[in-house]
Amino acid sequence: MIYKADENRYNNMIYRRCGHSGLLLPALSLGLWHNFGSVDKLETIREMLLFSFDNGITHFDLANNYGPIPGSAEENFGRILANEFKPYRDEMVISTKAGYLMWPGPYGEWGSKKYLIASLNQSLKRMRLDYVDIFYSHRPDPDTPLEETMSALDLIVRQGKALYVGISNYSAEQTQKAESILRELGTPCLIHQPRYNMLDRWVENGLLDVLGKRGIGCIPFSPLAQGLLTNRYLNNIPDDSRIAKPHGFLKKETLTEQRQNALIRLNEIASNRGQSLAQMSVAWLLKDPRVTSVLIGASSVNQIKDNLQALSNIHFSEEELKLIDETSIPVKLA
């Protein structure tokens, strides 16, 4: 059966301007970091992508290393794009990144022009695209001059392989320098993708101010702190949860008694707002006008559906914000 997008897909989504650009992004964007790789069921991936688009999520965020195996998320997305989404390509914002290890040797990671250009060429082939809408430097390179990394981003735009460029995981100081270099080259820095949630607020120590002043959009990832900001850990640790697994970012020692009590209190605040803890966590990020979109992850259609409900209430009273600030206990994730 040929896929036909829902005619009402734009009716209920909020679209926000990305910095000082002409680009609007949906308040929720879908990240393909986990659950979209070669080890996952293609039919489930297809269902999540189609459901997202049918509900106004037009931005799909990837990276060269997303999988597992690395590159397989782009391959799966490219397959579905060619089969179902082809008529709708111009209604989508598709992004990818390069910065982490992709192949052996000195040219397979970080921020050299050699690596960034080669990586994007590979990504375009995997996704069966002529260009991406946004291409990111995924992380700053301590050993490559920032001028080289930014000139590679500028070249990529001039080659027509990306419409916009962005950076991810850059500090406030690094962001200022990167933005200045790109501006001089004539290719503005469109967007910054940092990790940001109620338990991890490092961006509030300068980065958000830089983004606001320089007209750069912000799209936080890990809005639910790898699942901590959900109802999964309010009572105990489920056997199938991320913390219970021997690998990954979350460790059992992360969930201290003090932090679990804080999560319970945050959940009470959310309940009083008529939201789940996860919904409030997403809404809390969108309260700041400097945040263009929140990058959600998902393993099922139901999780996406639950996140969409956060958009029904993204306003907070001063009392609610004060309670959240008093309750949140920072957590350091790898």
Image: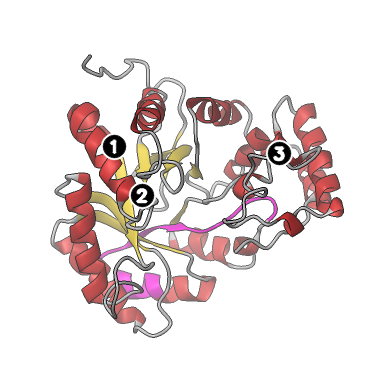
Specify whether 153 is left or right of 240. Answer: left
240 or 1, nearer to the observer: 240
Residue 169 spot, x, y in % from top left? 48, 65
Q: Mark on residue 265?
A: none
Specify whether 269 is left or right of 198. Answer: right
Which mark sits nearer the N-terminus, 1 or 2?
A: 2
- Which residue corresponds to mark 1? 92
Residue depicted at 59% across the width and 57% down the height: 249
Region rendered in magenta? 178-199
Residue depicted at 43% across the width and 82% down the height: 142
Q: Mark on residue 62?
A: 2
238 or 275, nearer to the observer: 238
Q: Secondary structure at mark 2?
A: loop
The type of residue carrying mark 2 is Leu
In the rendered image, the vertical position of residue 21 relative to residue 1, given as above or below: below
The type of residue carrying mark 3 is Pro
Which mark sits nearer the N-terminus, 1 or 3?
A: 1
Q: Nearer the viewer, mark 1 or mark 3?
A: 3
Are there few (<14), some (14-19), or many (20+) residues within 10 Å of tag 1? some
Residue 183 spot, x, y in % from top left? 31, 69
The type of residue carrying mark 1 is Met
